[in-house]
Amino acid sequence: MSFDLMQIGTSGVRASSELLQTTSRNISNLNTKGYIRERTEHATTVGNMVGRPETVRLINDFAAKQLNRDISNKAYYDQFVTESSRIDTLFAEESNSLSTSINTMFNSLQEAMNQPASTVSRSLFMNSAQGLVEQMHRLSNIVFDQKSVVNEQLSLYTDEANSLIEKISQLNNKVASTYTSDDHTVALSVLNERDQAIRDLSALVDIETLDGSNGEKLVFLGSGQALVMENGTFNAFALDGDPDPNVKDLKLDVRSGKAIALDVDLGSLKGKIGGLMAFRDDILQPAQNQLGQIGIAIADAFNQQNALGMNLDGNLGGNIFSIPTVQGYAFQNNTGTGVVNATLETGLGRSLPATDFQVTFLTATTVEISAIDSEGNVIGTPSTANVTAGAINSGTITSGESFGLDMTVTGAAAAGDSFVVKLNSIAAGSLELATQRPEHLALASPIRTEVSANNISTASISAGVVSNTSNINAGPPIALAQGDITITKTAVANQYQIVDGSGTNLVTITPPANSFLNAAGAPYNAYGFDFNIEGQPATGDVFTIKVNSNGFDDNRNGLALSQLKDDELVRQGVVASADNFKTFNESYAGLVTEVGVIANQAKTNGAAFDALATQSETWFESISGVNLDEEAANLLRFQQSYSASAQIISAARTIFDTLLSAAR
């Protein structure tokens, strides 16, 4: 009997000791990152003895996977909100407002119009135009600086992700090696370390896990690509800027580089890396393109209208702004030697959407032009064009539109070669003034109209509008290609005689005599300027159109320049429609608003995922976390069990000693 008691007591002491050790480990690892609460379980053997113990981790795989998902989403929005809030604040600053610079330039233009012959007022305009250019550069630099920050963080995060992927693979090998041993015992600390590495990886990218053979954990991206596979193989992240080296795309490749790199679906990527990518693609690049588009629209509109006027030197106006030419980025798999350069086709600033463009050679002499978003996806319907004498522009388009691009091709491009043209993105930081001379501001109109002093009626002629200067010789001095135009009312109803260098012709103009030269037909409708005759002219009334010699106090073209501020000249989307345009200020306000809306929406979503992550963590910790109250109760219970088992041993010894004494 005493022998049985001794065995029972000994097994009880051993079991209680093991339970105390497990409880002690739980308590001491309360603040250990990644520690999973343990529990020691005993089975009853033959004779109701306490059997060998088995210590297990208290973990719910479903709760762990849900926590990893919520951590990825939370990290995504935390990163996105941090980055977007910074750029939102910078754009919202009044000192950074492009609208302020636009308004200042047009206000200075108004002052110059009040004193069109003054070089001082014109100088003030040129200073404000330079201020607008500098503001464009400042905003562009803000965006480029943020892009540099994004690239630096991406490099750090991908290195960290690759280290975790390799670590998980190595820990898998440790687990698998113990599964092939005789006792199949796995150190629980190795499992804890692996689970923590998986959780750390989930903060960088969204992942899913599957149980592999021999206790391995297979890790996949949320979009399905494998990260950690069986037998110690794994894929690593790589940053590759193709075609633009400044815009890094995430790739997956075998570390040895012997396999073709896999593209990662950036649109569905979560975690910190996904948040950075989304911030770059949803805010930074669109903002950069919209800034450049506004700058190009202003520059082109101003240049075109200024070219229709007469400057203070008495010559036709020229460009006020210089629009840059950019070289297209060639894809790495191009096989030809072609080079594509692009700028804006003169006068087509209104046709340019705020996107990048991909030019793909269908043959050596035909191309497809597509507007693309920040991720390289085609927007709308691509256009096709011929490459004529190395040029691609609106005149060589065979279907669709040119999007305002004027491109040149040098070298020999092969079929299938592609280039990405980033005119908008680069223009914001490259726009410059084409002149510094205030005299080059063309406030006057190059033509003037007169009514003969001998006219009998009260009919009048409008000041005239210039639409192009193809029939005005640039000079100096400027001159009408056909000389002065004299219009005389004949005795025939609605009939006029037109005399100029083209000859003498009789034309019939049905009242009202608006757009007179256009109504007169060829060759007058191609002169590039026109006017209205208002009222009812009498027979013999004479009207004259001539060069505006010495008309430096004239501000008619200045009025047209000032009207540009209220004209809808900025295209809002790729798909053309009648209401698809905004003014310069409206477009910039839309940009700032869009950034703010996206940032605030991300904050709202982020708060929701914060709550979900907290809920998931609470659920996980309720199962796997150490509860001090529970462990303290267990410690007391197991201590009492240990003491009771020791008392059984003591009682068995006493009985055994009594039996020995009785035998003596």
Image (spheres, grey):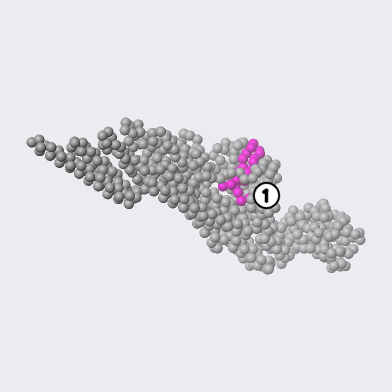
What type is the residue that disc 1 sits on? Ala
Picture layout, residue 458 above or below residue 601: below
Q: Nearer the viewer, residue 636 or 218?
A: 636
Residue receiving disc 1:
576
Where the N terminus falls, by quadrant? top left
Q: Nearer the viewer, residue 536 or 491?
A: 536
Report if residue 344 is visible in the image.
no
Q: Residue at x 57, y 42 (%)?
A: 330
> Which contiguous range is marked in magenta?
348-374
Circle 1 Cα neighbour tier, 10 Å, few/some/many (<14 / 14–19 / ≥20): few
Report if residue 217 is visible in the image.
yes
Q: Give left or right: position of 100 versus 500.
A: left
Q: Nearer the viewer, residue 484 or 402?
A: 402
- Residue at the limit of the structure toward the front, as seen here: 662
Q: Position of residue 71 (x, y in %)?
A: 45, 48
Q: Position of residue 337 (x, y in %)?
A: 58, 38
- Residue at the limit of the structure toward the right, as seen here: 491
Residue 366 falls within the magenta-colored stretch: yes
Q: Give left or right: position of 500 versus 122.
A: right
Q: Quadrant of residue 503?
A: bottom right
Where the C terminus falls, by quadrant? top left
Picture layout, residue 294 above or below residue 54: below
Residue 299 falls within the magenta-colored stretch: no
Q: Give left or right: position of 661 versus 289.
A: left
| Element class at badge 1 | loop
Q: Residue at x 64, y 53 (%)?
A: 572
